[in-house]
Amino acid sequence: MFPKWYTEKRREAKELLKKAKPAKYGLDVDLNAFSLQAPSHAKINELASLEKDVRDASKVVGTRDDEEYRSGTYFQYDNDVVYLQHNKSLKEKGLVIHSIDDAVQMYPWLEKYWFKELPMGLDKYTTYVAANSVGGAFVWAQEGARIEHPIQACLFMGADRAIQAPHNIIVAEPHSKVHLITGCTVHPKCETAAHVAATEIYVKEGAEVTWSMIHSWGENFHVRPRTGAIVEDGGTLMMNYVLLSPVKSIQMYPTVVLKGKGARVSFRNLILGRGKSNIDVGSGIILSGEESKGEINSRAVIMDETTIDMRGLLRGNKPGTKGHLECRGLLLSDKAKARAHPNLDARTNEADLTHEAAVGKIAEEELFYLMTRGLSKDEATSLIARGFLDTDIPGLPPALQKEIGRIVSMTTREVM
């Protein structure tokens, strides 16, 4: 049975939803065109027992069904958490993983984190999740817990015209360390659906959190992830995002508040824009702790008739803060469009904020050079694109670094 505070928050969100405002950026999606109702899926005892189509799709976004080099696994199929487990020895070291629906019934203190850094009324997508969330992962690294291998989570969709609305909460207590890799993907027979998610991340003093998202959707999918995070004294948050597939529309703008002294955050966004995708992605960093530092690095290869907007915000509120923003786009089609929107906002004369932005095509001399070495034009283009989507992400474990690089390389080879 859910606690009283939870049911009251849901009731409040449902009232807010009646007058919720559209997002500031991106296409406005009619969520009423999709249903929260989806076929139910039975729990499984091992990932290998999933049907082959599901396993194959989840592997593309980094899910290992053998669970090697993984500290735990969360697998949600439509609205059902069909598999959840983590290493028993890690439980003793302080790693806790539950579905969010179970966690709110187990831990009364979750009330103080519930839509704290991600306001319920931010926009209609956030409010929708607050009112209607089904599933989502709760990850709690207790004080001093140092978790070597990543936790993997897969949010899988298979029902046509359905909407998936998970709410995730990650809490890293002081001096803990945890990695998460989240793969979002769909069944090949699923033609159209919507994914609307809310994720809140709380990084306490001296803690380290790495969160890598790999998305592979369908060309008729609408995707609206919402993320808010807070980082306290000496904490570090690294957020990596990889988009590999065509998508009808995606809009996201994760915002991190560096509240503590010496807090740090780093964003790495790697985007392969294909088909007629409408992509509006950005990251925001609020530097509110003295000597806090933030970096946003976005790279996109834009093909076919894709339109992409790359946004970034650095707001320096305190002395000694530093931030750097870089947006680069590589156009491979005359019908593709790319725009960069850097935003620097210094509210003290002792904030150091910088940016670089560039959008353009492959230089003819680069193609010519590779073609004189025996490559065809398509092979040369593919090689340049793979190099442009630089997957060298500082701070990632070598195994995860290699895995993301392999996925990006495999996908670019297939589509070019």
Image: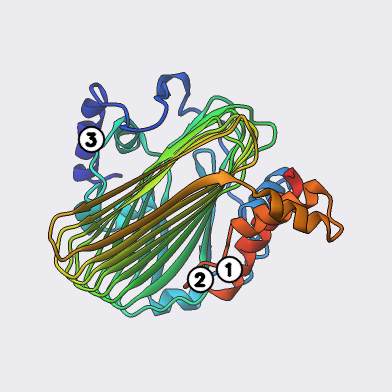
Look at mark 2 in the image and give the residue it sits on: 396
- The local crowd at label 3, few if under 14, some if 14 to 19, many if 20 or more residues have their Cα within 10 Å, is some
Judge from the rendering whether residue 350 lies leftward or rightward of residue 188; answer left or right. left
- The local crowd at label 1, few if under 14, some if 14 to 19, many if 20 or more residues have their Cα within 10 Å, is some
Look at mark 1 in the image and give the residue it sits on: 401
Residue 62 visible in the displayed image: no
Residue 140 visible in the displayed image: yes
Q: Position of residue 173 (x, y in %)?
A: 29, 71
Q: Position of residue 149 (x, y in %)?
A: 52, 73
Q: Which color scheme did the rendering employ for the protein? A: rainbow
Q: Amino acid at mark 2?
A: Leu
Q: Position of residue 415 (x, y in %)?
A: 73, 43
Q: Is residue 358 above or below residue 46?
A: above
Mark 3 and mark 1: span between their CA atoms?
Answer: 36 Å
Q: Are marks 2 and 1 in contact (CB under 8 Å)?
A: yes
**Rendered image: mark on residue 121:** 3
Q: Position of residue 414 (x, y in %)?
A: 75, 47
Which is nearer the eye, 11 or 329?
Answer: 329
Judge from the rendering whether residue 72 lies leftward or rightward of residue 384; answer left or right. left
Q: Residue visible at 68% across and 45% down?
A: 54
